[in-house]
Image (tube, rainbow, N blue to C red):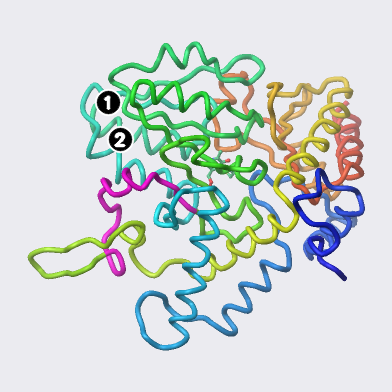
Amino acid sequence: MKGLSEVLAPETRKTLSSADVARIREDFPILKQQVCGRPLVYFDNAATSQKPRQVIEAISRFYAEDYSNIHRAVHTLSQRATQAFEAVRVKVQRFVHAAEDREIVFVRGTTEGNNLVAHGYLRPRLQAGDEILVSGMEHHSNIVPWQMLCGEKNARLRVIPISDDGELILEEYERLLNPRTRLVAVTQVSNALGTINPIRRMVEIAHRQRVPVLVDGAQGIPHLAVDVQALDCDFYTFSGHKLCGPTGIGALYGKANLLEAMSPFQGGGDMIVSVTFEKTTYNKIPHRFEAGTPDIAGVIGLGAAIDYLQSIGIEAINAYEEELLAYATQEVARIPGVRILGTAQAKASVLSFTVDGVHPHDIGTILDQLGIAIRAGHHCAQPVMDRFNVPATARASFAFYNTKEEIDALVQGIRRVMEVFG
Ligand code: C6P
C-alpha cells in the first residue's frame, strides 16, 4: 500500500478526508484490536498517543542494525548511531523552527525540560521576594518545580486566573507581571480544558518587562505548527510520546544565549570537556545538559515520529482535529445532564465533561466496557478542578487517526452511562 505522502503531497492537503484517515489507521497496529469485545476507540491521546509502524520499525531497525553508544567511540557503529542521533536534533530544530540545532536539548519529556529550566536557569537567579508567574491551567509539572524553588528561595508563586470559559484573563496577567517577576511559565494548550493560549501575545507582554517565558508545549506540539522564533518564547518543552513517538524522550528548546548562561543540571559523562579532581570544564551546549547515556533509540523513534507527522502535514492534522472536536462538542453537548468544562474560543483536541450524578471514574469504567478509552480524573491539573468546583472530569482527547464514527460511539456510550445510573 502506498504511504499517504505518495498519494498526496502534504503541503497540498488542507484537511484529512475519511479515505486519508482510513489509510492512516492502517499504520497503527494497536487500533485494529477489540477491547471488551468491541472495536477499540482510543480517546486518551492527551495522555499519550499511539505509535505508527513507521516509528516502531525505525526503533527496531536501529537496534537491529546501527545500535551503539554515541559520542564516545571511533568505531563504525558508534559513528552511525551518533550521526543518526544528531540528525534528529536537526529534525527537531526544523520542526519547531529553532534558529540553531544547539538550541535543542534532549530530555526525558516535558517534566524534565521544565525541571531543567527550574534548576539550570532560574535557581541561581531567584532571590527572596522574587516572583514566578504561572497560569491557573497548568499541569502539575509546570507548577511543582516552580513551587519547590519558591519554597527554597522564599520567592512567591503567582497565578494568572481563568475565566468561566477556561480562558486566561489577560488583563490580570498584565496586572500580575511586575519588576519582581523572574519567569512566566505557561502552557500552550491546556490538557484539562483544551484551551489554546495566546502565547505570542503573552510573550510580547512579558518581554516588555524583560521577563523570560517558558512555554509548556506538551499538548501544543501534537496539534499545532510550532515556530519558537515566531512565538519568541525563551524556552519550549515537549514530550515525544504525545507526538506518536516513544516514551522517555522529549526536548527542551532554549534560546542559545540563555542556554549558554545556564548551569548544568546533572553531572556525568558527555557533559564535560575535561575532568580532574580539582576542576571540571563543561561541554558546550546542548551537550552540557545531556549527562550520561541518553535514550538513543528514543531519539531515533522521535525522529521517525516527526517524519511521519510531516508526511501527513501538521496543518492538515490540525484542521481535521478541529472538525473532530467541533463535531464531538456539538454531539456531547446535546446530551442532557452533560456539562462541558472548557468552552474557550480557541481549543485543541480535548473534550472534558461531567455527567450529573455520575462520578467520572464510573463514566470511564463503563466506556471502557464498550471499548472506549478515555481518561477520568484530575488530569494532573488539580487547580483546574478546584477552579471549576469538580473533583474530576471525564476527558476524551482526539488525534488525527480518530473518526466521527468513533465519536458517535462515544455519544452512545455516554447515553449508556446515563441509563446505568439513571
Ligand atoms: N499530561 C495527560 O494525561 P510528561 O509526563 O513529562 O510527558 O508530560 C507532562 C505534561 C506537561 N504538561 C502538560 C500540559 C501535559 O498535559 C503533560 C502530560 C498527560 O494530560 C499525562 S499526566
Image height of 56 relative to 78, above or below: above
Q: Is residue 342 above or below residue 351?
A: above
**Tag 2–tag 1 contact (CB < 8 Å):** yes
Q: In the rendering, at what x and y percent does residue 51 appear? A: 70, 61
Q: Which amino acid does label 2 sit on?
A: Leu
Q: Is residue 118 above or below residue 208?
A: below
Q: How crowded is mark 1: few (under 14 residues within 10 Å), some or many (20 or more)?
A: many
Q: Position of residue 124 (x, y in %)?
A: 22, 39
For ligand 1, the image quadrant comes to top right
Q: Which of 145 and 187 is in front in this view?
A: 187
Q: In this view, does 240 lie to the left or right of 373?
A: left
Residue sitting at 60 percent across and 84 percent down?
A: 64
Secondary structure beneath label 2: helix
> What element does badge 1 sit on?
loop
Write the start and end of the magenta stretch as one range: 251-271
Q: Mark 2 points at which residue?
A: 149
> Is residue 253 located in the magenta-colored stretch of the structure?
yes
Depth order, front residue of 169/87: 87
Q: Where is residue 188 in the image (x, y as percent from the top left)?
A: 56, 34
- Quarter of the image that includes the C terminus: top right
